[in-house]
Image: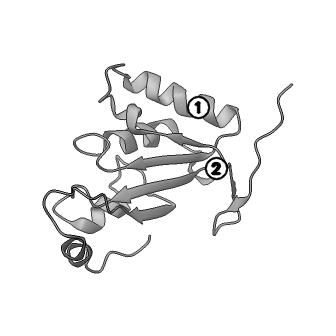
Amino acid sequence: MSQPLSRQLVCSNGLPASELALGCWPLAGMTRSGVTRDAAVRTVATALEHGINHLDTAYCYGEHGESEKAIAAALKGRRAEVFLASKCGIHWQPDRRQTVNGRPERIRPTYPLKHLPKNSGGFSRRARHERWGSLTAP
């Protein structure tokens, strides 16, 4: 029998998060594997069944937050069990706060990160910081 996953990171609500995270980019269906919404939901459910409750996603995983939408569908009634890290900074919704805070069909992150890849649409590091303006954690 396998050992339970270690949980060293503790969320602000007291939830211990697994050290191992599920990277959710493929859940958007953008990879060559062509992950369907049903497969994405099953993947998240399987991760939770095996003690992985740390999910990593971003609004840019899909043209309009498809990864976050798949996670929202998978977590109906289980959001409090999950530590969700999300990123912003590669592309935005018109209202930048919605990029971080989500919409009803997406899911609100536990911990939003400002992502600073070297090549971000021609914007300098300083310009990206300025574009973020008053974004705050949810």
Residue lying furthest front in this view? 118
Q: How many marks?
A: 2
| Residue 44 image point, x, y percent | 54, 34
Q: Which disc, if any, is residue 84?
A: none
- Residue depicted at 32% across the width and 50% down the height: 59
Residue named by callout 1: 45
Residue lying furthest left in this view? 122
Left or right: where does residue 16 sit relative to residue 134?
A: right
Residue named by callout 2: 81
Q: Is residue 19 above or below residue 32?
A: below
| Residue 80 image point, x, y percent | 61, 54
Quarter occupied by the C terminus: bottom left
- Residue depicted at 42% across the width and 51% down the height: 107
Numbered disc 1: secondary structure? helix
Q: Quadrant of residue 26?
A: top left
Within 10 Å of disc 2 (Cα), the crowding (few <14, some 14-19, many 20+) is: some
Residue type at tag 1: Ala
